[in-house]
Image (tube, grey):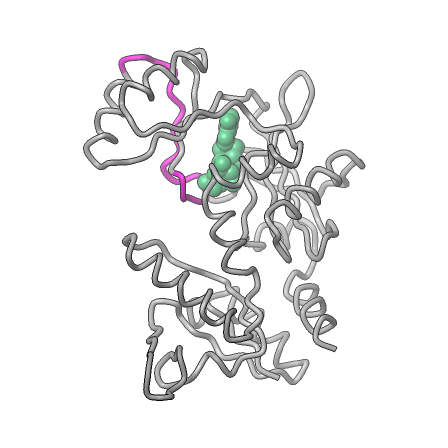
């Protein structure tokens, strides 16, 4: 059996997965997604990395897809789709990654599944963005559509500041993704789901309103009540993910809001807060599905 890992060679995550797979006797080469070569015609393998064909893998575990130009990102996703079409099981699937990497699309699916989401307005035009800022009561969180670890997310509470930031974004032809600011006592909840089951959850306490661990938040293990468990599982199912990290904001005064679902979730912080061994569980799930 061969399980390829799409990620950065030597990274903490790739090494952890390779160690678990090696103990199970599974060949687990790592393929950086930026080094793929695709061929058509001539009867050669479709997709290769340094001469090694990816088509020969039974499973491809997608651990990292770095940002890039529109062409680069689309080509990388095309390649994952192509491998799926050729019979390789890609985890998470190319469609799930596309859905989850895009915060807007994720929330549309979550809302359609009946899950609570913050009021959010997405626009292309400067004027529409300013109108959205006022519609959201002049206290908004502006996010890159594709982003992680809190990078590039800003809170705007001043109309002049909104004007200046939105004008700058207009020059770069960005999309405006604006969300009502949800007061949350500088805490949020990360839930890790594998195969439709919650395997661990943690509460992250931020140094400020941005509660990413990359932003200095501390993490503590959390036991979920049924409502939160259901909400997390439903969110992951809405994206068709085999495994995912779900971010939920506890609103001050009560209630929960789903803000994103990570289809390529990290687990380093979660692992040290909860003691859970994500690579073991993930590999167990994948190998069970192949028996
Ligand atoms: N609408 C919001 N209101 C208040 N805080 C928010 C809101 N959206 C995000 N945050 C804070 O910012 C953090 C990062 O937002 P998130 O949407 O999860 O993006 P990222 O992909 O960068 O983690 C969240 O964990 C939360 O602490
Ligand atoms: Mg997040």
Residue reaching furthest left? 171
Identify the image quadrant of the C terminus: bottom right
Q: Is 189 in the magenta?
A: no
Q: Is residue 208 above or below residue 218?
A: above
Residue at image position (62%, 82%) is: 26
Of 65 and 24, nearer the camera is 65
Residue reaching furthest bottom? 43
Of 258 and 20, nearer the camera is 258
> On the picture, is 242 further left or further right than 124?
right
Quarter assignment of residue 171: top left
Of 40 and 1, nearer the camera is 40
The chief SS type of the magenta part is loop
Identify the image quadrant of the N terminus: bottom right
Q: Is 150 in the magenta?
A: yes
Residue at image position (50%, 62%) is: 63
Q: Is residue 290 visible?
A: yes
Query: How many numbered discs, if any?
Result: 0
Q: Is residue 93 above or below residue 129?
A: below
Residue at image position (79%, 35%) is: 225
List x then y, in percent, for residue 197.
75, 52
List x then y, in percent, for residue 41.
33, 83
List x then y, in percent, for residue 150.
44, 39
**Bounds of the magenta segment:** 145-160
Q: Is residue 216 visible?
A: no
Residue reaching furthest front? 41
List x then y, in percent, for residue 164.
23, 21
> On the picture, is 161 further left or further right than 279?
left
Quarter assignment of residue 246: top right
Residue at image position (73%, 49%) is: 198
């Amino acid at each position: 059996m061969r399980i390829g890992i799409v990620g950065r060679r030597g990274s903490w995550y790739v090494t952890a997965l390779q160690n678990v797979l090696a103990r199970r006797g599974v060949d687990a080469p790592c393929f950086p997604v930026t080094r793929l070569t695709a061929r058509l015609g001539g009867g050669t393998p479709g997709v290769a990395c340094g001469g090694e064909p990816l088509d020969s893998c039974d499973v491809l575990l997608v651990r990292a897809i770095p940002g890039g130009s529109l062409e680069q990102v689309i080509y990388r996703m095309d390649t994952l789709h192509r491998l799926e079409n050729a019979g390789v099981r890609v985890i998470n699937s190319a469609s799930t990654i596309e859905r989850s990497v895009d915060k807007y699309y994720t929330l549309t699916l979550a809302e359609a599944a009946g899950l609570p989401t913050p009021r959010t307005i997405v626009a292309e035009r400067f004027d529409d963005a300013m109108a959205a800022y006022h519609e959201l009561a002049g206290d908004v969180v502006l996010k890159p559509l594709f982003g992680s670890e809190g990078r590039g997310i800003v809170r705007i509470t001043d109309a002049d500041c909104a004007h200046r930031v939105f004008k700058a974004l207009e020059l770069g032809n960005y999309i405006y993704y604006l969300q009502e600011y949800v007061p949350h006592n500088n805490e949020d909840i990360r839930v890790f789901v594998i195969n439709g089951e919650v395997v661990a959850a943690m509460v992250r306490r931020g140094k400020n309103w941005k509660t990413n661990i990359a932003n200095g938040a501390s993490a503590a293990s959390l036991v979920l009540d049924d409502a939160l468990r259901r909400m997390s599982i439903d969110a992951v199912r809405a994206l068709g993910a085999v495994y995912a990290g779900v971010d939920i904001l506890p609103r001050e005064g009560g209630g929960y809001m789903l803000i994103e679902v990570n289809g390529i979730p990290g687990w380093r912080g979660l692992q040290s807060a909860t003691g859970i061994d994500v690579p073991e569980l993930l590999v167990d799930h994948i190998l069970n599905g192949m028996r």
